[in-house]
Image (cartoon, rainbow, N blue to C red):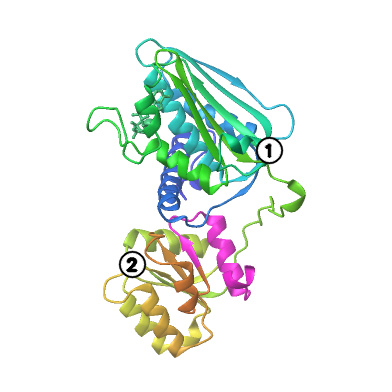
Amino acid sequence: MVLEDVDPGGPEHRRLELALKGAKRGRDLVKQILVFSRHAEQDRKLLALSDTVEEALKLLRPILPSTIEMVWRRSEGDDVILADPVHIYQILMNLCTNAAYAMRDKGGILRLGISRVILTEGDRASEPDITPGEYVVLEVRDTGRGMEPETLERVFDPFFTTKKQGEGTGLGLSVVHGIVKSFGGHITVESEPAKGTSFSIYLPKADERLCTVGKHTTPVAGGKERILLVDDEDIMIALDEERLTGLGYEVVASTSSEEALEIFRKTPDRFDLVITDYTMPNLTGIDLAAQLLMIKPTIPIVLWTGYNEAVSRERVQKAGIKAFLMKPSDKNTLAATIRRVLDGETDERRG
Ligand SMILES: Nc1ncnc2c1ncn2[C@@H]1O[C@H](COP(=O)(O)OP(=O)(O)OP(=O)(O)O)[C@@H](O)[C@H]1O
Ligand SMILES: [Mg+2]
């Protein structure tokens, strides 16, 4: 919101943009940790791997020491996969920081490249858990200290690390492994002490014709409906009230779910939609929804939650809630979700 108010050419704008970017990356990281631990929903789309890697490298290059030379080779031709770009970023981040760590004493060369291969039944002899088919391969190769066979054997184990206590989590490669497996992919590693290490990530090539992932984003659409907004955090209320009012809605806000229930009970017809936080003292968002629906069964309710793990989509739907939003949501997502719910489409019907 502040961004919209400041001069787009000025330094504040740039700094705010960076802060927003940082916050979004934080949100995405939390999401990925949840994805990794719960196989929760992913935001997969068709992407050309070379383009995504190139974007990620722009962010990675500045954080790697200058003693490391980076060599990058794009794929020749089509390298479209179905994946969540945040996951690709996480894979690269982990592999590149590991490589940089292995080269920290003398520097070296970090090579990244993308190629395509077809794996056949014959390849299963050496790697039994692969599925034959067409793959896009991302290779990350370093000239660092390499690994002894005993280390190599355990690299993907959660919490396995050769770093000093307190320096590494040992989770980096197990996160990478988890992501690659969730894509139906495969990962191999080769390493030799004093020579270097090479990781190859095999990701199934997507058949564009089979995918119907839309690339269009709908423009921000507001409305004149009346919304009851419930969240126990003052800051959230203040921000969201302003955002919703900005979209044209009439907003009644409350920081107490019990108070909100009373407001609603007195004048149920004053409201077209309720947006409620999930975690609140005394009466949670789900409990509130149940009570509101008893008063007015047709009232659409959107649940806003900061913790994806606390409440499953299934439970939300069972409670009669029409949609849920993950905090923080950007303006477009917020606006689109509200419109969709007010216009009578539910998450369920969207499939
Ligand atoms: N490129 C590499 N060269 C040499 N050894 C590596 C390389 N990548 C990983 N390893 C070894 O595998 C271990 C596990 O890696 P992983 O990324 O899972 O955890 P970590 O790097 O030790 O901790 P964190 O990722 O939290 O910093 C490392 O401690 C290191 O011994
Ligand atoms: Mg690591």
Q: Amino acid at mark 1?
A: Thr
Q: Is residue 146 above or below residue 77?
A: above
The residue located at (48%, 78%) in the rendering is: 318
Magenta residue check for 327: yes
Which mark is first along the chain, 1 or 2?
1
Q: Quadrant of ligand 1?
A: top left
The residue located at (26%, 30%) in the rendering is: 167
Left or right of 323? Residue 81 is right
148 or 340: which is nearer to us? Answer: 148
115 or 295: which is nearer to us? Answer: 115
* Residue 121 pos. (x, y %): 67, 40
250 or 179: which is nearer to us? Answer: 179
Circles 2 and 1 in contact, beta carbons < 8 Å: no
Q: Which mark is residue 185?
A: none
Q: Is residue 122 above or below residue 268?
A: above
Res 223 visible: no
Q: Amino acid at mark 2?
A: Thr
Q: Which mark is residue 120?
A: 1
Q: Residues within 10 Å of mark 1 (few under 14, many from 20)?
A: few
Q: Does dot 1 land on a helix, a strand or a loop?
A: loop
Q: Which residues are magenta?
A: 324-351
Query: Given the current orientation, which residue lies at the most extreme front position?
Result: 125
* Mark 2 CB lies closer than 8 A to ligand 1: no
- Callout in the foreground (2, 1): 1
* Residue 351 pos. (x, y %): 62, 67
Q: Which picture quadrant has residue 105?
A: top left
Left or right of 17? Residue 288 is left
The residue located at (44%, 73%) in the rendering is: 315
Q: Which picture quadrant has residue 266?
A: bottom left
93 or 37: which is nearer to us? Answer: 37
Q: Which residue is mark 2?
A: 279
